[in-house]
Image (spheres, rainbow, N blue to C red):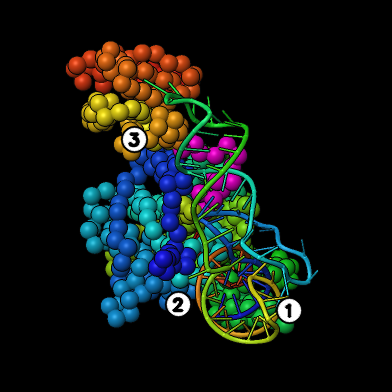
Amino acid sequence: MLLKIKAINGFKDILPEDIAIWRTIETVCRDIFARHAFREIRLPILEKTELFARSIGEATDIVEKEMYTFTDKKITMRPEATASLLRSFIEHGLHVSRPIQKLFTVGPMFRHERPQKGRLRQFHQIDAEVIGGSEPQIDAELMAMGQMMLNELGLDASLEINSLGCRECRPSFRSALVAFLDKSQDKLCDNCKRRSTTNPLRVLDCKKQSCRDLVADAPSILDHLCDECDTHFKQVQHYLDLFSVRYTLNHFMVRGLDYYCRTTFEFLTGDLGAQAAIGAGGRYDGLIEQLGGPPLPAVGFAMGIERLSLLLQNKADGVTPEPESDIFIAVLGERAEQTGSKLANALRAKGGRCGIDYSGRSLKAQMKIANRNRARLVLIIGEQELDKGEAILRDMQTQEQSSFTLKSNIAENCTELLKISANVLTTTEL
RNA sequence: GUGAGCGUGGUUCAGUUGGUUAGAACACCGGGUUGUGACCUCGGAGAUCGUGGGUUCAAGUCCCAUCGCUCACCCCA
């Protein structure tokens, strides 16, 4: 045997067994987007490298070392969706058609990190962005929508929120924080010693207990917000309360992308190993302008589909897969095969989900296939019945069998079978 | 980039101090019902034990190397 070619590290197949969960996630989220008047946008996977450098930030880990880039062509496989979406928004002047654009997109993202539980190199995100509004209601509504998605998927997650301030107030907080960290340099972990100069905000996010203890007394960004940011953040909380969305303030929360300002938030779970965030986002008011677009405020978030999927898999009452067929046609002998195959394809043309096997297996083997397909009905066409113009119709669940008259008009047979099938399927749903 | 753990049929694993033809469960195929699934029962097929080298009379087992996977750090969805 030749050497097998395997998928590359961090890239996963989504097998037929996994699809039910994926479709559930997508269906639930799409439905909720529709209820919130979001429209879908589909974007390319490759973009100019510069797009991500300018939006995510040159100094971030993502841009510095995690992007899949064709260096000779200066193009990159997108590590996140927001940059691409804004590029498209600006390029097509979408702000002209509506004062506020509510857009979502679903698809693969690529980051060259070491894979681990809940973290892949190709992963999928559901991404939502509201462009053109700075009102705190929008922030709150977006979080409420994210919470609705998790609720309707039956998942528990906590929502943590913070405000990072704006260009006006962040510098004063930053210098206060740096001053605080300087006093305790020797107590910080090596990593945080480095970060206290390169990206002091990140020290707040350190997971080491010693740093967490130290940082507990650090100045809070929330005490340094300018009046406008402070009012905005209080309003966000007011509307979250109004919408009955539960949340906790976490002034240690820092996001890894440079473009966030004001509101940031994360949906967190304790059931994903080291990966706590299943969805996260925030406001990025200056970014569109920075990418060459009009000065529009915006806010958005992304959910990780693989992470949602892992959580759904862990649930006892998991998602049940759809049957491969509703009606399976078992045939015995060549004449039956002729009748059965013709009927199967006619049924499909009329919208029926129909299975059939042509390998001439025993009836027993065909019944096993029907069972595995989770077909509710099996139409058994045998020589003896065929002579009488009949077939046997078996309900696999109730185990009841009845004789089915095969009319010469095949359309009539289809109509009759589809009627019985629909009938049987709805009665068991209730 | 750093660290730890693990590589045995399709899948999950067992394999004792190295010792005959490497086992099981699930899955698959077939029989028990010459025309009836899911349950039961009997049988069958399926493994270069990740790869290369070494030690030994003898290696799945010990040693070295290499590749791969997983988890964690980091960072993030």
Packing grade of label 2 (10 A; few <14, some 14-19, many >=20) is: few
Q: Position of residue A170 (x, y in %)?
A: 52, 69
- For the residue pair A385 and A220, the one nearer the viewer reads as A385
The residue pinned by badge 2 equals A64
Q: Is residue A26 magenta?
A: no
Does A395 sit above or below residue A30? above
From the image, tell me which residue sits under label 1.
A187
Which is in the foreground here, disc 3 or disc 1? 3
The answer to whether residue A311 is magenta is: yes
In the displayed structure, A30 sits above or below B71; it is above
Q: What is the distance, in whole Å, between disc 3 and disc 1 at their CAs?
A: 76 Å
The local secondary structure at tag 1 comes to helix
Q: Are marks 3 and 1 in contact (CB under 8 Å)?
A: no
Give the foreground label among 3 and 2.
3
- Element type at marker 2? helix
For this view, does A339 lie left or right of residue A207?
A: left
- x%, y% of residue A240? 54, 44
Q: Is residue A136 visible?
A: no
Magenta stretch bounds: A307-321
Tell me the chain of label 3. A
Residue bearing mark 3: A360
- Asked whether residue A3 is in view, the answer is yes
Image quarter of residue B63: bottom right
Residue at (23% x, 58% y) in the render? A93
Seen at 32% across and 63% down, the residue is: A45
Q: Amino acid at mark 3?
A: Gly
